[in-house]
């Protein structure tokens, strides 16, 4: 039996870049001050003082030249680059990691900290390094002196060091404190691997760590529209909490010490480890969220950004939602796990959820995939990963194929203009059921994208469905179309009429549709109105409201005038009420507080109240001293808040239209959607429309997520 895990996914690409420089024979400064390149120049003579050389034979002379990329300024880091010369001919060194650097004296050792080919500059002054490299059994060495300019020295802490301190602090939501008992601030330099708005994962050469709900200031440069950006190199300063085995660096809105800026210096980043069955087995031993003895073990894994190769997609635990957390099932060898979008059981926090939805929509059960950048967040009740949108890479390496396809028709014989439904089933049932429909003879019968077959002329046609997954897998069925006067055509037995709304406004129209039973009978009907002075109907069933009153619309079979169907319509005056949420709306409230507000616009009364768990409604004082809303133009509606609209007494709701502005943090001008509805339970953007049930004039908006609306237009029929 496969072991099951809960993996919640946080996803992004981490790479290490090494800048190279060359060519100049003296100190060179480019037009940008942070890209200074300094180079030691080799002397190819045997008595060169800038480099010492050894030779494997009397014919070959070797020497080293050292340069760097970055800014040689205290507080910065530079990347050291070695170049080899053989008999005066330059040759690049591919394995830079095998060049050894040490400080030449105590004074230099106080100015620089060497890690591989990265030098962290601790102070200003002249610094001399010894460099050595072994080539073809020959040791080549040199001495290199460069000048470090004055700058601001920042005490950078590695992520591994922070995790050690987090374990010592305690794992019950404990903060790392300084000697005075206040929160200790840490500076981290690394790359943003995976993001979800104001939260992200940062990675350095020692590991990865979670950035929780960061409050950006106007001076922070490490953000776009107050969101982290995957793939950027940053320097951040904040305090750290051990949240049940998760080391989280964060800050607060009132924080004056924290910052988050882009960093232009050199930062070494660890490569993503591969998530394997062996690692899953290790994590399996830590799967008890309630066991505090295991949390210290967890913290070393939490924040690690993995790559997963060869995972098999098993499906969704439920239909993908943009308003709640989602669990996407995979297996890796003998283990099952789930990648999770960011959110809770009642909310989705991911600003990039549409990107993830598109990825998931393309997956089929059985697909083999590679997933890049999956950070472990927390282990409990199994294993939990976060999978955020920005930085996520999912590649299908092996696609599941369709095996067979069957087609059925609700009725195999229809009349000219008659229709029937074709259905298709793709095997195996776990893969995409998407198909395309075609007809072998469209002059006899057509079929639309939904499988509705319509008779055109007497004859036969083959209706074929083709799998969109595997276009060589098809299924088909034969449809026979008979003429209406064909003696073989069955007699009509009933006519039914469908209409979107039985209330029509004066000057408005509504399309009626007639269906003759059975489907193989002639589908042609004639339309009539009982009172054309109230409502007219044309030969195609389009009903138009003329004057106030009631009328009966009849559809009669052209084969038998004793077979007909009717529907009653009411023609009423429609009224429109448009409420625009701009500065003109933000006055004249009947009541207003942090819990809700009420005001009347024209004939419509609006009452807005927050949910018990919702953030207080923002209010402020206008120049005239009136209490008004703090967020307007467009108006802000928090998740789960309810806005009730009451129309005039006795009025009947017809439809509603609104514009929702899609926001990202404080930026609400990215995109907008416009939608309308005429039915209860429908959604408009991130709002669900519900009705009172006992009254036709009261309905409400419930915000499914935080949303902002620019206007609402309500169409309704006033009381008679």
Image: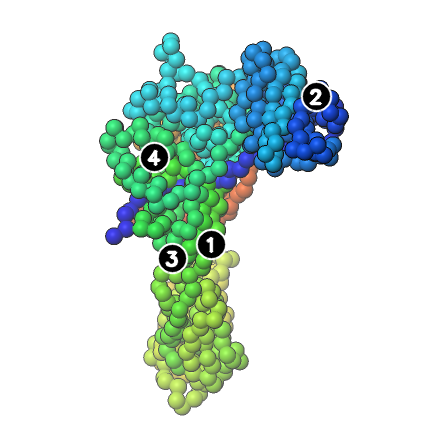
Please indicate, yes or no, whether residue 634 appears anywhere in the rendered image.
no
> What x and y, as percent, mark residue 81?
63, 29
- Residue at numbered disc 2: 50
Color theme of the render: rainbow
Q: Work out how far the residue at label 1 is from the one at label 4, CA to CA, in angstroms.
A: 27 Å
Q: Which mark is residue 305?
A: none
Q: Earlier in the sequence, mark 3 or mark 4?
A: 3
- Residue at numbered disc 1: 396
Q: Quadrant of residue 432?
A: bottom left
Q: Work out how far the residue at label 3 is from the one at label 4, CA to CA, in angstroms.
A: 27 Å
> What x and y, as percent, mark residue 633?
52, 33
Judged from the image, the secondary structure of the residue bearing numbered disc 3 is loop
- Residue at numbered disc 4: 378
- Residue at numbered disc 3: 365
Q: Earlier in the sequence, mark 1 or mark 2?
A: 2
Q: Work out how far the residue at label 1 is from the one at label 2, CA to CA, in angstroms.
A: 54 Å
Discs 4, 2 touching: Cβ within 8 Å: no
Q: Quadrant of residue 639?
A: top left
Judged from the image, the secondary structure of the residue bearing numbered disc 2 is loop
Which of 660/424 is in front? 424
Q: Work out how far the residue at label 1 is from the one at label 3, CA to CA, in angstroms.
A: 12 Å
Q: Earlier in the sequence, mark 4 or mark 2?
A: 2
């Amino acid at each position: 039996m496969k072991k099951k895990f809960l993996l919640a996914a946080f996803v992004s690409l981490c790479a290490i870049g090494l800048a190279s420089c060359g060519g100049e024979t003296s100190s060179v400064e480019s037009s940008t001050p942070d890209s200074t390149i300094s180079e030691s120049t080799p002397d190819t003579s045997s008595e060169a003082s800038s480099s010492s050389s050894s030779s494997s034979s009397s014919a070959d002379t070797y020497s080293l030249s050292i340069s760097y990329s970055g800014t040689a300024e205290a507080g910065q880091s530079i990347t050291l680059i070695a170049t080899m010369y053989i008999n005066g001919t330059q040759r690049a060194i591919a394995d830079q990691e095998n060049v050894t650097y040490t400080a030449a004296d105590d004074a230099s050792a106080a100015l620089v900290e060497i890690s591989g080919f990265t030098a962290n500059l601790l102070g200003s002054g002249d610094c001399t390094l010894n460099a050595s490299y072994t080539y073809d059994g020959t040791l080549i060495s040199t001495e290199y002196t460069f000048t470090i300019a004055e700058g601001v020295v920042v005490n950078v802490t590695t992520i591994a060091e922070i995790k050690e301190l987090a374990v010592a602090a305690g794992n019950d939501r404990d903060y790392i404190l300084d000697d005075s008992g206040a929160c200790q601030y840490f500076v981290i330099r690394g790359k943003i691997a995976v993001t979800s708005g104001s939260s992200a994962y940062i990675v350095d050469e020692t590991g990865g760590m979670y950035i929780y709900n960061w409050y950006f200031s106007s001076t922070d440069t490490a953000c776009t529209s107050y969101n982290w950006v995957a793939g950027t190199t940053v320097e951040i300063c904040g305090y750290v909490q051990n949240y049940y085995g998760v080391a989280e660096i964060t800050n607060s809105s009132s924080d004056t010490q924290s910052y988050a800026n882009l960093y232009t210096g050199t930062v070494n980043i660890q490569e993503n480890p591969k998530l394997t069955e062996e690692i899953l087995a290790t994590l399996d031993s830590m799967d008890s969220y309630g066991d505090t003895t295991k949390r210290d073990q967890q913290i070393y894994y939490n924040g690690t950004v993995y790559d997963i190769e060869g995972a098999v997609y098993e499906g969704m635990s439920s239909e993908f939602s943009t308003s709640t957390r989602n669990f996407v099932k995979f297996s890796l060898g003998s283990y099952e796990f789930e990648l999770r979008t960011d959110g809770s059981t009642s909310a989705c926090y991911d600003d990039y959820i549409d990107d993830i939805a598109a990825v998931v929509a393309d997956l089929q059960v059985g697909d083999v995939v590679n997933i890049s950048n999956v950070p472990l967040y927390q282990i409990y009740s199994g294993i939990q990963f976060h999978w955020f949108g920005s930085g996520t890479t999912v590649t299908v390496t092996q696609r599941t194929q369709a095996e067979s396809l069957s087609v059925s028709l609700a009725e195999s014989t229809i009349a000219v203009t008659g229709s029937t439904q074709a259905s298709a089933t793709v095997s195996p049932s776990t893969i995409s059921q998407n198909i395309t429909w075609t007809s072998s003879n469209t002059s006899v019968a057509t079929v639309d994208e939904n499988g509705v077959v319509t008779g055109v002329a007497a004859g036969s046609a083959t209706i074929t469905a083709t799998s969109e997954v595997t276009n060589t897998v098809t299924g088909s069925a034969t449809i026979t179309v008979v003429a209406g006067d064909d003696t073989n055509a069955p007699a009509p037995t009933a006519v039914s009429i469908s209409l979107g709304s039985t209330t029509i406004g004066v000057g408005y129209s509504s399309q009626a549709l007639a269906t003759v039973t059975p489907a193989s009978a002639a589908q042609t009907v004639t339309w009539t109105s009982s009172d054309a002075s109230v409502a007219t109907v044309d030969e195609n069933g389009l009903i138009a409201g003329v004057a106030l009153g009631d009328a009966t619309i009849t559809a009669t079979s052209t084969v038998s005038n004793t077979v007909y169907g009717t529907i009653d319509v009411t023609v009423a005056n429609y009224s429109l009420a448009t409420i625009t949420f701009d500065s003109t709306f933000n006055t004249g409230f009947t009541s207003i507080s942090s819990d809700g507000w009420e005001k009347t616009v024209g004939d419509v009364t609006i009452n807005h109240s927050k949910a018990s768990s919702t953030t207080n409604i923002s209010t402020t004082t206008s120049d005239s001293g009136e209490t008004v809303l703090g967020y307007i133009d467009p108006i802000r509606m928090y998740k789960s808040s309810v806005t009730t609209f009451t129309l005039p007494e006795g009025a009947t709701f017809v439809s509603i239209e609104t514009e929702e502005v899609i926001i990202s943090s404080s930026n609400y001008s990215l995109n907008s959607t416009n939608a309308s509805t005429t039915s209860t339970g429908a959604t408009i953007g991130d709002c669900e429309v519900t009705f009172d049930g006992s009254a036709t004039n009261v309905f409400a908006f419930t915000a499914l997520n935080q949303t902002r609306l620019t206007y609402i237009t309500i169409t309704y029929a006033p009381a008679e």
